[in-house]
Image: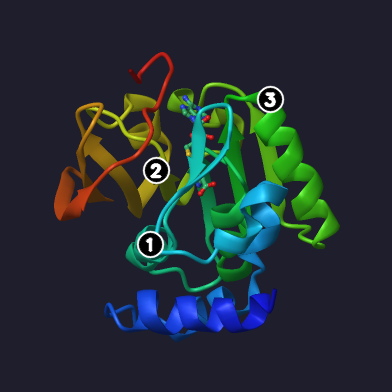
Amino acid sequence: MNYQNLRKKMVDEQIVARGIRDRRLIDVLYKIERHRFVPQESRSSSYGDFPLPIGGEQTISQPYMVALMTACLSLKGDERVLEIGTGSGYQTAILAELSKEVYSVERIESLAKRAQELLRELGYANIKIKIGDGTLGWSEEAPFERIIVTAANSDIPPPLIEQLKEEGIMVIPLGDRFSQILTVVKKTKDQIIKTEICSCVFVPLIGKYGF
Ligand code: SAH
């Protein structure tokens, strides 16, 4: 299987053709080997235009959704980013390439350990992974310039608003269990501004402030 060709096709046809323009992000998508983040038996379809199962009833998000969420964060390179839902670690690797430090929380131990091992093997030294309930955030490391939640919730967990720095940006799918709207949240001195991006379907965020 020529993964490099599949990857180029994925970026050109699913990402660039749909309007993602962030050059740094596009270069990172060309580079990161998405097939390494999925179970062995699904590697041949890892560059397809859909999410894939990664075990524990969880999924690696569709490539375009990963790209769109990352683009919404407008990363420049000096940010500390909190990710809720490490899953496969694919999104985590992209964030690590585009920011200063990534703090990622995953509730399923087996997924967290697998992602941690792979990301270490790939040489990322700016990622910290914690097993736990991400709806509580990561208070010891707060505040964060950016927060990304890769599981669906009915509302923004209050600790995450708290832990987002002023002028910070959060991206989170908000809605019910079966369909959501990808939402960009900006925190200013005295208000929270929400912008709706598009409809989407994510697995549920499960925890104290989740489903
Ligand atoms: N970005 C990941 C998405 C994985 S799916 C990827 O593309 O691979 C969402 C993940 O969120 C799942 O791994 C699920 O276990 C995790 N999750 C759900 N609720 C959570 C919570 N409260 N805290 C941390 N992780 C959670």
Residues at circles 1 and 3 in contact by the CB criterion of under 8 Å: no
Mark closer to the observer (3, 2) = 3
Task: For residue 188, say whether it is visible.
Answer: no
Mark closer to the observer (1, 3) = 3
For this orientation, the residue located farthest to the top is 208
Left or right position of 54 against 197 = right
Density class for disc 1 (Cα within 10 Å; few <14, some 14-19, many ≥20) is: many
Q: Quadrant of the N terminus?
A: bottom right
Q: Amino acid at mark 1?
A: Leu
Residue for badge 1: 73
Residue for badge 3: 109
Horizontal and vertical percent position of residue 169: 34, 54
Q: Is mark 2 within 8 Å of ligand 1?
A: no
Q: Quadrant of the C terminus?
A: top left
- The residue lying at 54 percent from left, 55 percent from top is 91
Measure the C-alpha gap from mark 2 to mark 1.
Answer: 13 Å
Horizontal and vertical percent position of residue 163: 43, 37
- Residue placed most toward the observer, 102 or 69: 69
Residue for badge 2: 164
Measure the C-alpha gap from mark 1 to mark 3.
Answer: 27 Å
Density class for disc 2 (Cα within 10 Å; few <14, some 14-19, many ≥20) is: many
Tally of numbered discs = 3
Left or right position of 95 against 146 = right
- Residue placed most toward the observer, 174 or 145: 174
Left or right position of 122 against 70 = right
Q: Which mark is residue 171?
A: none
Q: Amino acid at mark 2?
A: Leu
The image shows residue 202, relative to residue 97, as above or below, that is above
Secondary element at image label 1: loop
Task: For residue 32, say whether it is visible.
Answer: yes
